[in-house]
Amino acid sequence: MEILILFITGIISALLTYIVNNKHRQGAVRASAGLSLLVGLFFYFFPEIFSPYLTKNIPIVFIGATFIGMVSSKILPSYLLVGFSGFIFSIIYLNASPFFKGYGGALGTTASISVLVSLSLAVVSRSEKLPWRRNKKQQ
């Protein structure tokens, strides 16, 4: 059950940040920082609501997945792809987080890998070129 909650946290975090960043035009940094601050403060003031495992890991997964939501809508234009990236982030976090111990930027690296996986799936599933590589005649 705890793992399912972390998967849901990763998906919701990426989607919320993406919406605040792109739809509400708050910018990537403001969207990520604002949402992360809210979640961090919630778990700081109410640590007893969830189990100690979730109290420790939900803020970490949330902050890491907000890095996914910082992506431009020109790169990942679909909510489905952003949510899938959050899911991939959660999988990598749960299975490979001990590998990243001692490395700075582990959450950002994991988020970057997640976005690249989603982007590559989107490109492979279509016969179109990458969004930033289209000729002006195609647009």
Image: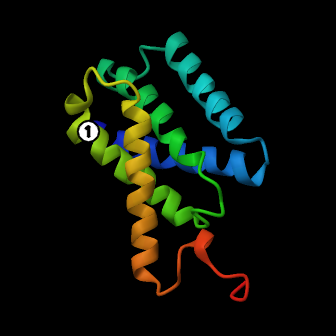
Residue 6 seen in the current view: yes
Given the current orientation, which residue lies at the most extreme right position? 25
Which residue carries the number 1 mark?
94
- Residue ID at (54%, 11%): 45
Looking at the picture, how far across and down is residue 21, in whole percent?
Answer: 70, 46
- Residue ID at (62%, 79%): 134
Residue 90: quarter of image:
top left
In which quadrant will I find the C terminus?
bottom right
Looking at the picture, how far across and down is residue 29, in whole percent?
Answer: 67, 34
**Structural crowding at the residue carrying mark 1, measured as other residues with C-alpha within 10 Å and reported as few (<14), some (14–19) or many (≥20):** some
Question: What colouring method underlies this structural image?
Answer: rainbow
Residue 61: quarter of image:
top left
Looking at the picture, how far across and down is residue 62, in whole percent?
Answer: 48, 34
- Residue ID at (62%, 44%): 17
Q: Measured along the vertical axis of the image, is residue 133 above or below residue 35?
A: below
Q: Report whether 120 appears left or right of 3.
A: right
Q: Measured along the vertical axis of the image, is residue 17 above or below residue 82?
A: above
Looking at the picture, how far across and down is residue 94, in whole percent?
Answer: 26, 39
- Residue ID at (60%, 45%): 70
| Amino acid at the residue labelled 1 | Leu
